[in-house]
Image (cartoon, grey):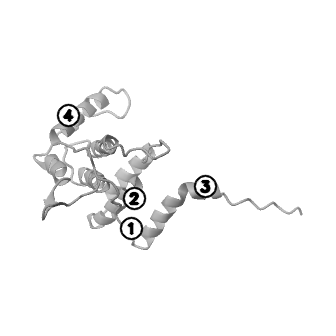
Amino acid sequence: MAETKREKFPSDLLSSYKKALTILKQYDDENLRRQKKRKAKFVLKTKDCRQIVKELKKRLADKKDKSGAGSLFGQEYAGKFEGIIKGLYQTYAGKEVYASLEEKAAHLLYFAVKDHPFADGNKRIAAFLFVYFLDRNNYSRAENGEMKISENALVALVLLLAISNPKEKETMIALVTNLIS
């Protein structure tokens, strides 16, 4: 019987996924911490976000595919959406509660998914506003030019937040901040 050649360890693959493995280890050890690296320069305003949601609805409704938006898409429940946006900039004792760009982005995504501020489209709107906020802060792409959060990763992340237990909020926020940092 001929000896089979041992496959060389794929070091390049390991280096491509080292951050992911580190985050998974921190999660296993219950040691996942929020990343707070950058200050947000772009400020989300409720009025502008409402306009984006309106335009998103229009563009999705024009589609002949399955990404469309019905009449309830983006229809706000009184005060919920504005509360989420304003909450990103709240202060306590003169300091911002969510001081970093990563924290603001993570909380935007989390609350827009979990608090259901709209009659329909919460996950899609949350996902789009999340990437919009990152993009406007020049934080949507990695140094190599690739998107920090791929389309598939965005879907998985939004669905994870949607099904997560509210008791896991801090872990979910920490996870999002790690994925975008």
Q: Position of residue 83 (x, y in %)?
A: 14, 51
Distance CA(mark 3)–CA(mark 2): 20 Å
**3D distance between C-alphas at marks 1 and 3:** 23 Å
The residue pinned by badge 4 equals: 51
**Which label is found at residue 13?**
3
Dot 4 falls on a residue whose secondary structure is: helix
Residue type at mark 4 is Gln
Give the numbered dot on residue 178. 2
Pointer 2 with pointer 1, Cβ within 8 A: yes
Q: Position of residue 172 (x, y in %)?
A: 33, 61
Instruction: Check residue 172 in the rendering and tell me which mark sits there, or answer none.
Output: none
Between discs 4 and 3, the one toward the N terminus: 3
Disc 2: CA contacts within 10 A as few (<14), some (14-19) or many (>=20) = many
Q: Earlier in the sequence, mark 1 or mark 3?
A: 3
The CA span between labels 2 and 1 is 8 Å
Question: For this view, does 45 lie left or right of residue 173?
Answer: left
Quadrant in which the N terminus appears: bottom right
Three-letter amino acid code at the position of disc 1 = Leu
Q: CA distance from mark 4 to mark 1?
A: 35 Å
What's the residue at 37%, 60% (across, down)?
Answer: 175
Instruction: Give the residue type at disc 2.
Output: Asn
Residue 11 falls in which quadrant of the image? bottom right
Which residue is identified by label 1? 32
Q: Mark 2 and 4 residues: CB-CB less than 8 Å, in contact?
A: no
Of the residues under marks 4 and 1, which one precedes in the sequence? 1
Q: Earlier along the polypeptide chain: callout 2 or callout 4?
A: 4
